[in-house]
Image (cartoon, grey):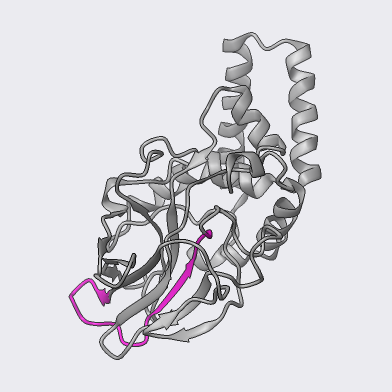
Amino acid sequence: MTTTEQSTTDAATAGSHATEIARSGAATFRTGGGSVDQQRAASVIGAALEGIRSAIREQKVTYEEFDAFKRWLIAVSDTGEWPLFLDVYLEFEVEKVAAETQDGSVGTILGPFWLDGQAQLSSPATLPMRDDEPGTPMILAGQVTATDGTPLAGAKVDIWHTDDEGWYSGFASKPPAGNLRGVVTCDDQGRYEIHTRKPAPYTIPLDGPTGQMTLAAGWSPWRPAHIHLLVTAPGHRTLTTQLFFTGDPYLGNDVASADKPELTLDPQRTGNGDEIRSDRDFVLEPEA
């Protein structure tokens, strides 16, 4: 999305789609779901509420500000932006906690723009795209192995990213359904090769309450260009990660705090026109 176009982005459309996905519980593949007991609920909810109360006391929040906060909460609900707000401003802390007990490749947040039911492809694969898909042709390739180095035959790489203008298919009207999304099955050596286009940086929707809050605070609304991936294999923990690009002007200032040096790619030209390539292996740990 360009800066001008994003000012007219339909945040409510993207928000409603993300809300339906979150409501379905589709993201429970990361943890297997499960219930929370009353003592645990009281502990977590109590701590969260005390954090808000502490902010009110320390910042001497006025009734005018409190009423503005109420209106903002209503706006977030009306636009369906709760998944966006939570994924941008809180999920990275949950991911840090999860990473404390995880081995294998480095992960990061899922974000609100994953979609189930995408094209099933075999490696080498070309993601669905328009005949005249803009952007730099790119190959992402590598191997999926277990922590002991065993190749994971038939592992799956679920991949999605924006187009050259920063739009996600399924959350904006510009790209067709399924554009630049797919689930790629690795070969019998766990190897994959995916042909796509290099994505672009983008801002979170600026016409919704999350974007308005971000701008009001003077924070950058930008996300560096990135590729989302879910890497899976039977008997192994799902890896949720993103890959970024060296030289991106928004690295280190990601609104979602999801970029990490270990996840930065440095693609090289292949000699085939403008095409670039980057290799990235993934290591999956056994399920607990």
Is residue 162 located in the magenta-colored stretch of the structure?
Answer: yes
* Residue 36 against residue 271 in the figure, above or below: above
**Residue found at x 76% / y 48%:** 12
Using the rendered view, name the quadrant where residue 102 is placed: bottom left
Report how many numbered discs are placed on residues in the image: 0
**Of 40 and 223, the residue lying toward us:** 223
Q: What stretch is highlighted in magenta?
A: 143-163
Looking at the image, residue 254 sits to the left or right of residue 17; the answer is: left
Looking at the image, residue 1 sits to the left or right of residue 228; the answer is: right
Q: Residue most toward the bottom?
A: 188
**Of 55 and 39, the residue lying toward us:** 55
**Position of residue 96 measured from the top left corner of the image (x, y, whole percent):** 39, 46
**Position of residue 267 measured from the top left corner of the image (x, y, whole percent):** 27, 60
Q: Residue most toward the left?
A: 148
Looking at the image, residue 32 sits to the left or right of residue 232; the answer is: right
Can residue 141 be seen here? yes
* Residue 171 against residue 255 in the figure, above or below: below
- Name the image quarter holding the C terminus: bottom left
**Position of residue 169 measured from the top left corner of the image (x, y, whole percent):** 62, 64
**Residue found at x 66% / y 71%:** 177
Can residue 31 be seen here? no
Is residue 27 located in the magenta-colored stretch of the structure?
Answer: no
**Residue found at x 36% / y 52%:** 244
**Position of residue 14 measured from the top left corner of the image (x, y, whole percent):** 70, 53
* Residue 216 against residue 120 in the figure, above or below: above
